[in-house]
Image (cartoon, grey):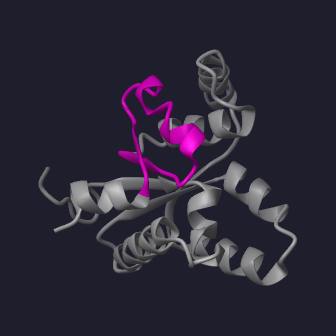
Amino acid sequence: MEYATHNEMKLYLDNCCFNRPYDDQSQLRIRLETEAKLRMQEEIRSGRLELVWSYMLDYENSKNPFWEKRTEIARWRQYSVEYIAQDGEVLKVAHLLRGKTFKSLDALHVACAARARADYFVTTDDGVLNKAGHAERLAITDPIGFIKEVMP
């Protein structure tokens, strides 16, 4: 795939992905995912990738007991090009995804990404990654997979 530029590729990063840099970096996978996520952040800040934000990100982030992390993650909303609120379409898609064994919150996140017509849903959650084939018209990958597939 040729690398897309601004206004061509929309990403939805779930809450686990936003929290990856705060995880224990002693494991190689976590360090690599963190580096890949930080590279994606650079591309978002520069406008070469577009970020989608949702009410689900606001909700899950509000549950973070660490105010420093919660504040830093919430700042990413300012870089988003689109905000997805709960609506009938999101709930309908989430219901369909629940029928495909997605957990409730995961289904809502994926439904928000689908509502925004995001090109990629990026997560570090193995449970979501294992169900990637069940989300039609939405590529689900981890930060490393995204970098390998899309970035130059």
| Residue found at the far front of this picture | 27
Residue drawn at x 58%, y 49% is 125
Residue drawn at x 26%, y 55% is 8
The quarter of the image holding the C terminus is: bottom left
Q: Provide residue 11's location: percent of width, then percent of height.
A: 42, 55
Q: Provide residue 76's location: percent of width, then percent of height.
A: 58, 73
15 over 112 or under it: above or below: below
From which residue to which does the magenta span run?
Answer: 119-142
Residue drawn at x 52%, y 68% is 30
* Residue 38 belongs to the span the image colors magenta: no
Q: Provide residue 91's location: percent of width, then percent of height.
A: 69, 27
Q: Quadrant of residue 99?
A: top right
* Residue 139 belongs to the span the image colors magenta: yes
Residue drawn at x 71%, y 51% is 55
135 over 74 or under it: above or below: above
Q: Nearer the viewer, residue 15 or 6?
A: 15
Q: Quadrant of residue 119?
A: top left
Q: Nearer the viewer, residue 116 or 72?
A: 72
| Residue found at the far left of this picture | 2
| Residue found at the far bottom of this picture | 68
Q: Provide residue 95's location: percent of width, then percent of height.
A: 67, 20
Q: Nearer the viewer, residue 78 or 66?
A: 66
- Figure label count: 0
Image side of residue 21 versus residue 139, left or right: right
Q: Quadrant of residue 70?
A: bottom right
Image side of residue 9 versus residue 121, left or right: left
Image side of residue 144 versus residue 101, left or right: left
